[in-house]
Amino acid sequence: MRFVLLAAAAVLLSIGVLQPSFAQRRTAKLPPAGPAPRGPDGRVLLGGANPDQKGVWVPSKVIVKPLIPLNEIPFEPWARAQYDSRQATRMEPHTRCKPSGSAREFLTPYGVEIDAFPRLKRIYIFDIGGPHTFRTIYTDGRSHPQDFDPTYYGHSIGWWEGDTLVIDTVGYNEGFWPDRMGLPHTTQLHTVERLTRLDSRTMTYEITFEDPGAYTAPWTAGFTLRWENGTELYEYVCQDANEAAQLLVGENGTSVNRTSRIAP
Amino acid sequence: MIKNKRRLASALSLAAVLAVGAALPAAAQEGFPLKGTWLGTWESNAVNGDSVFLVLDWNGKAISGTINPGTDNIPITDASLTPKGWVVHLEANAKDKSGKPVHYVIDGKIEHLELPNRTIVGTWKSEEGSGAFNVSRQ
């Protein structure tokens, strides 16, 4: 028995000595980023450098503020008033497990995986946090359809401008917030996103919003995404056990109208 | 017999307007606050009945819509939304059974703006009467 205890202690001690402490891991410098990986055609890869390299893109820092200063966003008066009212209520559809289009998709928890299928001439963006959805970007040269039923992710067509993937999207429905803070929009929303991978670990994301129903002029915002190496897509089903008790019975036992017709 | 026929006609009318509403996009909860279909009551309305159904739209510049599409088809002639207090003003021109013009004025406020099934609560008035107005977004 004494021998077992001594052996266990020795193992634990060796683990403690050989493994860097948490503080040491946090402050350990990452090796310098390598160049952005490229495929056989020279095109920048937005996923792993090879099929064995897994990873997702996450915001380089948590963004819980407006994408740009509020006084720079050309709101229509009703849109600014609605934005302000949302700061008090914070009833974002994302929390009710609705898909999040435009910039919000890249700000959902746990990251997004971008997969290009050259033979299909499509790019798919899978997001982990949320209702287990994906977005399709057509890179086959097609135009937007004239009649398109509005959807959460809209209809996206993409093309390359050098090392930048440009994504043009129309056909959004009004069932989501384009950011985490409550930006309004209408079905007239048209976005142009530009994804540029700078190196092995960094990608810039820029989005231009054009929505004459909610804004008096187009405006542009952006942020940086970080490659989280090794993370693979995993099952995360937002609807599972998504019960907000305060929405069911209200505060202090008062009853409220249900906000979603989706059964928990 | 007459009462049953009236009930049947009322039910069929309501079914017709609901069918019209069901054909409209359903996910407009987070856009312009008035956009969508609204169902409720305008009480004590002897001309058009107590049930009311509104379909409202926003094209980026103006609010448009119809009251009781499919049955009464009352076009909305004037509409405004004042963000401060979310005050709603609607006007519409109808005709009574004899063909005499009836001009409706509806004033109210949006309540529970944060919810998809928000409500407009207020009053309606016309040359023929007035009463409480209460509709919920569907």
Image (cartoon, rainbow, N blue to C red):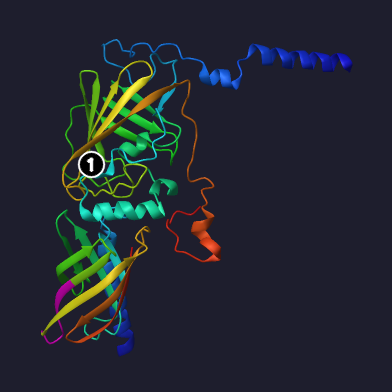
Which range of residues does the magenta coloring cover? Answer: B91-99
Which residue lies at the image location 24% right of the left edge and 22% below the top edge?
A: A164
Image position, residue A157 (x, y; %): 22, 32
Chain ID of residue with mark 1 = A
Image position, residue B137 (x, y; %): 32, 64
Which residue lies at the image location 34% right of the left edge and 60% below the top edge?
A: B113
Q: Based on the picture, tell me whether residue B98 belongs to the magenta stretch.
A: yes
Which residue lies at the image location 34% right of the left edge and 11% below the top edge?
A: A35
Image position, residue A72 (x, y; %): 23, 41
Residue A104 placement, left or right of A160? right
Residue A163 visible in rendering: yes
Q: Secondary structure at mark 1?
A: helix
Quadrant (top left/top right/bottom left/bottom right) for the C terminus of chain B:
bottom left
Image position, residue A215 (x, y; %): 20, 47
Q: Which residue, given by chain and number where applicable, does mark 1 sit on?
A: A72
Which residue reaches farthest right? A1
Q: Based on the picture, tell me whether residue A9 belongs to the magenta stretch.
A: no
Which residue lies at the image location 45% right of the left edge and 54% below the top edge?
A: A262
Going by the numbered disc 1, the residue's amino acid type is Glu
